[in-house]
Amino acid sequence: MPRSQITPLAILLIGVLILPLILSSLWVKVVTSAAIFALGAAGISVLFAQLGLINLAQIALIGVGGWVALRLNYATPLPFTVIVVIAGVATAFVGAILALPALRMRGLYLALVTLMAAGAFQILFNAFQFPNGGEGFWGVARQSAADIRRPSVAQSDVGYLRYTLVIMAAGFGLVALHRITGPGRAWAMIRQSEANAMAAGINVTFYKIWAFALSGLLAGIAGALLSGALGQLDARSFLASEGILLFALAVVGGAYSWVGAIIAGVLYKLLPALLNDWGLSADLALILFGAALLHAIMTAPRGIAGQLLGALQRKPS
Amino acid sequence: MKLTTTLLAGAAALCLASFANSAAADGHGPSCGLNTGEAATGEPIKVGGINGNAPPGDFSGGTDAAAAYFDCVNANGGINGRPIEYIVENDQWNPELAGQVAAKLVNDDGVVALVGNGSVVSMAVNANLYEEEDVMVMASGCAISECYESSNIVSTNQGPLPSGIGALTYAVEELGTKNAACIGFNIPNNGGWACDWMEDYMSSQGLTGTSILMDPTAVDLNSVYLQALSEGADTILLMLPAGPAIGLLKVAEEQGGRDLFKWVSPTPLYEPGVADVLGDYWNDNLYIHIELAPFDSDGADNQNWAAVVEAFGQDGDRRDTFSQSGYISAKFFVEALLELDTDSIDRATVSDAIRAINGAESDLLCAPYYVGDADRHMPNSTGRMVAYTGSAFEVVRDCFAIESSYFEPIRAQEAALGITQ
Amino acid sequence: MVYGLFLVSGLAVGSLYALGGIGLVILRNSTGVLNFAYGAIAAFSAMFAWQVTDWGLPGVISWISAVCIGILLSVAYGRLIAPSLAWREPAVKAIATLGYMLILLGLIGFIWEDALRRIDLPSDKIGLSLLGVRVTLTRIIAFVVSIAVVIGMVQYLRRSNMGLNMRALADNRDHAALLGIPIVRTETIAWGISGALAGFTGLIFGSLVRLEPTVITFMVIPAVAAAICGRLTSLPLTLAGGLFIGVAESMLTLYKPAAPLRTMAPFLIAALVIIWMQRGQKLTFAKEV
């Protein structure tokens, strides 16, 4: 399928080369945020599209990744990229642990378990806060935050945008790779019928945990990238309500394609910034999101991405 | 349809109308900048401002008042003929948005300085940016350590630390406090920071202080109150924004807690709308430290503040401490700009001019205002105490300096600049 | 003495969680919808009640209007949106209510700008001392109403025709439809009851805790935790769960290391209940509960 690979690569190339040239300083930051949360949303999509699982705790996992990254930044001299990878892997483990209750349940109860987890993490983040260069395990000093390192190629905001876009694309690539290889086939069978999948010799437990770990990996990387983008993290960014919103937008964008994840990131971060720039209330965005979620659930199960891609495919024929 | 805002603003406007009228009757219209009465038409000077207006608080008073003052300056000769173009952004208490709007103002719009900032999140996120780009921020509403421990931020308001300790000083000296509980948000550079220094103050006095830090999203204020009760404190210091502080006072009212503790608070509770929500229960039992002159003070600057916001403000503008503070920041900023050669105004000259401010006086402040070239700034660390009497606030102690070891570097600066002997 | 204080205080908070949980369970039992918008409906009702008072109308009208707005918002969703999702999985129905929640939250923010507000109920001024804590009539009302609603609803479901219909619908929607049970009417009544409870909860919550729309909206999360304790079906267990969560949360204040984490109580207890519910379930296949 050469064409399906050329298009995303071309878009990435355009994004990395052109976007930073035409965007002003404000929009460089906004697009960086949107790309980071697109990566987080891709994790939600993996679970929702491949296994039909609802994960409302993705924002909490992004927070975990950010926490690990900040902790390592202050405690070790490791380069930023290494920290990103370690944060991703550590969060993948947390995601896998979150999968344990999911092994025997799906649907509503799983959604509730993830909601409870999101609520609990919100309290944890509030109680212990994010490291800011202090002493001890939690690393919180009652003072202003110390500096955070960025990769040498991405010291400036523009460089960091390029860096983020490349990592985002790599994350999407990883998901695509899973879809067309063994795990993707296993997930498809599990989604059809767990009993059949097991009868066909698929290790259901392993592949379900694997999906959660992949989702957690993407969240962890997103969290680490976010810590580098902002220089510090705030517990208010990782409220359970934000987890609900991010999930809603992943569904609105369309969980079945990377385009959907990008749309989710854009809706989550770019639209409110646009409204703000136009002097409109951010409450409008909430109303729009709510209506879009209802619309997606009732009439457009593949989300905006599905509708867009559908329209594109119909045109040539 | 912002019905409520209009109503609130209407009430506030009514309260203030009397001052404004008296100011006008005395023949003092608003007085701003060069006071020429002619509109400035030259090339605009871009100035930025960031406020935080979203739950849990509206910190837009500072930028509102600065905007009103700049409008007044522009109508009165501007900066030697050049008008100020004031660009205000709202960070909505969102760290990412805070970073974005600061980048827009500093990099894209190229503002020469930021004035009237009233935002908590934005200071923490952007302190480094301001330092790197060497742009000065004359803030007006701040509540976290970054505002007072950064080289490029100077805030007219005090924030919770001095104001809280000021309130406690009064409690110790006048109300007989021995054991105080500081109730604050569990945010390291806000509640944690301020309550830590409050404990330090209490132990320096040979007294006991305890911090009760609560989750900002906590639902059950009742058990926070009960925690204070079980700590055996005799005084409660409400190191909180107005909303949660009022919530806690309500719980205490329900529990009949007025007489179990002495109640003191830093400035946030000094707000025109507070009487409507608190009622009469707390009359003469709640003491608040205020950082600037009372709203009804007849000092010339306070009267001028009221006249400026009356004449040039918007209907929805808040008339609170932040508003007074924004007025002062804007006024001193304009005075500094007027000293400069009109054609040489750029970020570097403006930053230098702001750093050169020394000994600026206003009857809104108890002591002279200064900036100086230092790694931290806190030009306002004196205040007054008022008692809540339901219908009004009554000054119970006039200007006094707040003492704590936190202020050592600041007192050293003041001595070096010749502010104090 | 100290324990009594925290017990009473915990029961007061717990009855708020329980009230929320009960409203959720009543609706879920008859319509199969877990309504995440419950908190947003409560918040809208409380804000509306404040608005009515602010217009200068007497208190009684504002409280009645809170309950009416609750019914209106709840039934609006139940009649306009819920029917088109009636045959989808429970999870999808629940997710759809998140959309409604976002819309309501946006509307609230749009209509009422952030400001200091409070709702005063006359019952706030009356109270009695219990184990050293002054308990206001409002808190007693919250407590008594939550118990009364549970008893009332259990009796209603058991004795009345409509209750029979609701139970039938809860057991099996298809069979109930075949039997000629008036599904639309039954569901509308369930949405109405749940909405009335939401309006009432919002009013009490706004008065007792904080009149802040986001806080009231997301109290739905601990309310869901209470509902999970009742396995999303049992009203008495939901009540017990809500009260237990409230007391546990309050008691944790006494243990200093855990005090900052005490608000985790609802989530931990709910998670434990979910794990306990799966005990003895050997099958590795997930099932739709």
Image (spheres, helix red, strand yellow):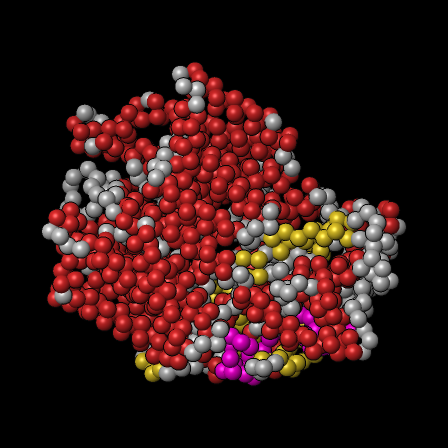
User: What percent of the width, then of the height, locates residue B408?
Assistant: 69, 63
User: What percent of the width, then of the height, locates residue B30?
Assistant: 78, 68
Q: In the picture provided, is B393 more to the left or to the right than C277?
A: right
B150 part of magenta stretch: no
Query: Majority secondary structure of the magenta segment?
Result: loop
Q: Name which residue lies at 28% across and 53% down.
A: C34
Q: Nearer the viewer, residue A47 or B149?
A: A47
B276 part of magenta stretch: yes
Q: In the picture provided, is A57 more to the left or to the right than B84?
A: left
Q: Nearer the viewer, residue B417 or C48?
A: C48
Q: Quadrant of residue B107?
A: top right
Considering only vertical position in the picture, is C41 above or below B292?
above
Quadrant where the C terminus of chain B is found in the figure: bottom right
User: What percent of the width, then of the height, locates residue C166?
Assistant: 17, 58
Q: Name which residue lies at 49% across and 69% down.
A: C117
Considering only vertical position in the picture, is A18 above or below C104?
above
Considering only vertical position in the picture, is C36 above or below A105?
below
Q: Name which residue lies at 71% across and 66% down.
A: B309
> Could one spot residue A295 in this view of the protein?
yes
Q: Name which residue lies at 15% across and 41% down.
A: C282
User: What percent of the width, then of the height, locates residue B95?
Assistant: 55, 49
Q: Which residues are magenta?
A: B275-300
Q: Quadrant of residue A17?
A: top right
- Count of marks placed on residues: 0
Direction right: furthest residue: B341
Q: Nearer the viewer, residue A217 or B66?
A: B66
> Could one spot residue B217 in this view of the protein?
no
Q: Nearer the viewer, residue A164 or A89?
A: A164
